Amino acid sequence: MEESIRNAFNLPEQDLRTYTPLTLAFVGDNVYDLVIRTVLLEEGNRKLNEIHKKKSTLVKAETQAWIAEYFLKEGIFTEEEAEWYRKGKNAKTQSHAKNANLSTYHRATGLETVMGALYIKNDTNRIITLCKIGTDAFLKAETVEE
């Protein structure tokens, strides 16, 4: 069995409610990015530019916002996840992504908050499930639009 980061570094257990939505989003952004990078890497060796381009498409704020709205519309979020999403989406931020409007940025932050909360809960299976459902739906919709 793999050792958790918390155990390896002898970190105390924290109540998830003590984290702010933006703190969870800070972690969740990186968790989501790492899952996408891992998937792209495991798809096979390709030119780095090609991998980066596809990664950028899947992790940008517009895509994350689209996925979050899809999850809400399709009822994919659990009640708890929907609450984290709402808190993250409504969090007051000092800035936003340079290539996204504020509304899009807030929805993306909501998704990142969910990913961060799941990571803190050590629910890797749910993170992977949501990433798979979301990216599959996005890529399918993107293909239909083309």
Image (spheres, grey):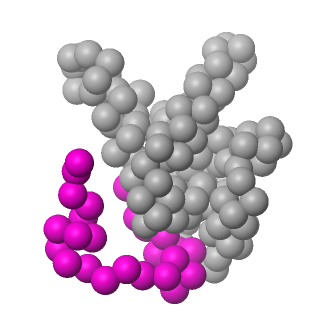
Quadrant of the drawing holding the C terminus: top right
Segment tinted magenta in the rendering: 1-30
- Determine whether, in the image, residue 38 is placed left or right of residue 124: left
- Looking at the image, residue 52 lies above or below residue 103: above
Measuring from the top left, give residue 13's x and y in whole percent: 37, 80
Measuring from the top left, give residue 64's x and y in whole percent: 59, 46
Residue that appears at 65% across and 19% down:
140
- Looking at the image, residue 127 lies above or below residue 86: above
Asked if residue 9 lies in the magenta stretch, the reply is yes
Residue that appears at 53% across and 46% down:
126
Question: Looking at the image, which is closer to me, 75 or 145?
Answer: 75
Inspect this view and state whether residue 20 appears. Answer: no
- Determine whether, in the image, residue 101 is placed left or right of residue 6: right
Question: Looking at the image, which is closer to me, 21 or 65?
Answer: 21
Question: Looking at the image, which is closer to me, 54 or 137?
Answer: 137
Residue that appears at 31% across and 83% down:
12
Question: Looking at the image, which is closer to me, 84 or 54?
Answer: 84
Q: Write down the quadrant of residue 35 in the picture.
A: top left
Determine the residue located farthest toward the front in the rendered image.
1
